Image (spheres, helix red, strand yellow):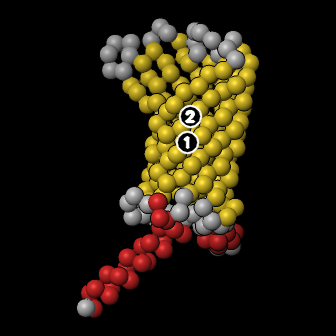
Amino acid sequence: MKKLVMLAIASQLIMISAQSQIQNGNLLVGGDIANFSLGLNEGGEFNLRIDPKLAYFVSNNLALGGYLTFGLETSKGAGKNIDYGIGLLGRYYLGTETNVVRNSRFFFEGNAGIEGNNPASGENTNGLGLGIGPGWAYFITNNVGLEALLKYRGIVGFGERATTSNLELAVGFQIYLPSAQLRKRMEENKKPL
C-alpha cells in the first residue's frame, strides 16, 4: 500500500512539473532544423534550414517572441540557394486533455516577418513571410523539450516571383527557463567574489 501511495504522489509531481514549463513569465529558447540532407555521391548537395527562437510566456500556454531563419542549399557547380528571415512568432499550447503521451503537449505556432528566398538560378522572392502550423512537444526533463512541427511557410512580396510557399516538417529542441530562477542566477553572478 505504501508503494502504491508513493507511486501516485510521484506521478502527480511529474504531471505538475510537465505543465510548469509553459507558465506565465517563463522563457522559451531553442530552435528547429528542417530540410536537412547531405548527398554522398560526387557533386552531391547539402541542404539545411535552421530557425532559432526566443519567446516569453505572456500568460499560461501562450508565448510571444521572435525568430530568425537561415537556409542554405548548395551543390557542386550549381551555386548556392539562400533563404533568410527575421520576425515575430506566437505559440499556443493546447490543454492537458489533448495529450497523446504523458509529459507532452500539442501546440500551434504562427509567425510573420521579413523573409527571402534567393536561388542561385531561377526566380527569387523577398517580402512578407508568413507561417502557421501544428506541433507536438515532448518534455524529456522539466526544462527541455523535443518537438516536431509541420508548418506551412509562404512569402508574399517582390522580386522575380510574387509568391513562394512550401510545407515543411521540422524537428526542434527547446529549453524552458523559469524567469524567477533566471533572475536569481543573474543576481548571483553580479555578486563580487
Q: CA distance from mark 2 to mark 1?
A: 6 Å
Is the Cβ of the residue at disc 2 closer than 8 Å to that at disc 1? yes
Q: Amino acid at mark 1?
A: Gly
Name the residue rendered at 49%, 18% in the picture.
74
Q: Residues within 10 Å of mark 2 (few under 14, many from 20)?
A: some
Horizontal side, residue 104 vs residue 8: left or right: right
Q: Nearer the viewer, residue 27 or 10?
A: 10
The percent coordinates of residue 29 (x first, y second) are 58, 53
Q: Residue at x 54, y 27 (%)?
A: 166
SS at badge 2: strand
Q: Nearer the viewer, residue 30 or 166?
A: 166
Q: Which residue is mark 2?
A: 152
Residue plotted at (25% across, 91% down): 1
Mark 2 residue type: Tyr
**Quadrant of image for the C terminus:** bottom right
> x, y (%) of residue 6?
33, 85
Q: Residue sitting at 49 percent across and 43 percent down?
A: 149
86 vs 124: above or below: below
Q: Which residue is mark 1?
A: 133
